[in-house]
Amino acid sequence: MALESWVLQRLEADADFPELFGKVVDGHNSVAILGMAVSLCLAFPQSSLAQSAPLVTCPHLWGWDIARWMGDRLPASQMGGWHRHRYQLTANKQSNERPHRKRDIRELLPYLVFGGDESLQAQVLAGVAAFPQHLPFEYEEEKNDSSKITELTEKMTVFAKRGDLENWRVQQSHDGDGYLWRRLPDLVRPTIDPRPQVQGAL
């Protein structure tokens, strides 16, 4: 959390996003760093297109970050050990209240789809559309669990609809600024368990 706060301060002071992002992310293999990477891209979506593309096309991160987003919305009093660890949890609460923490990884997708880079657009859409072929198992045993396979297949099929360009539209807002919306008929939002498991690291 301290590293993320420092990076955000540097970026807010106009530090170069790709350079600073590479310095703090490259060479790490922890889930915590992945979570921070998504957070930084959400904070600076227009500056992070090349960096957010591999994150957005990772099906594991969709479930984890949506769970993070849901957990961030919990009242501070519901955080574990609030009375014993008030100082630390207050800092966590303040971090969770940053504007970009009110969004999740799905909201990076419009920037990649309509960012003007057709090659990047094609790469990202193909990656998201292929989610059902790359089920995000958390444990090796789940690969032989028919109920888990069905659950993940249904969830990834819903997410994969965002990889179809026909499901995206651009519409003009009343103030003249363009905004994006998704035409996703017949879709039910998948249920994401917000309880801290692996996702808690995000």
Image (tube, rainbow, N blue to C red):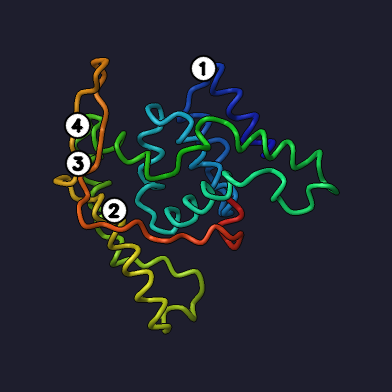
Label 4 environment density (alpha carbons within 10 Å; few <14, some 14–19, many ≥20)? few
User: Is 180 drawn above or below residue 66 in the view shown?
Assistant: above
Tell whether label 3 touches label 1 (CB within 8 Å).
Answer: no
> Which is nearer the N-term, disc 4 or disc 2?
2
Tell whether label 1 touches label 4 (CB within 8 Å).
Answer: no
Name the residue that disc number 1 marks.
Answer: 14
For this rendering, which residue is in front, 36 or 71? Answer: 71
Residue type, numbered disc 2: Val
Viewer-nearest of discs 4 and 2: 4
> Which is nearer the N-term, disc 1 or disc 3?
1
Name the residue that disc number 2 marks.
Answer: 128
Name the element at disc 4.
Answer: strand
Image x and y of residue 8, in percent: 58, 28
Name the element at disc 3.
Answer: strand
Viewer-nearest of discs 4 and 1: 4
Name the residue that disc number 3 marks.
Answer: 168
> Which is nearer the N-term, disc 4 or disc 1?
1
> Which is nearer the N-term, disc 2 or disc 1?
1
User: Is 103 drawn above or below residue 178 in the view shown?
Assistant: below
User: Going by the image, does 140 lie left or right of 121?
Assistant: right
Classify the position of the N terminus by image quarter. Answer: top right
> Which is nearer the N-term, disc 2 or disc 3?
2
Q: CA distance from mark 4 to mark 3?
A: 7 Å
Name the residue that disc number 4 marks.
Answer: 170
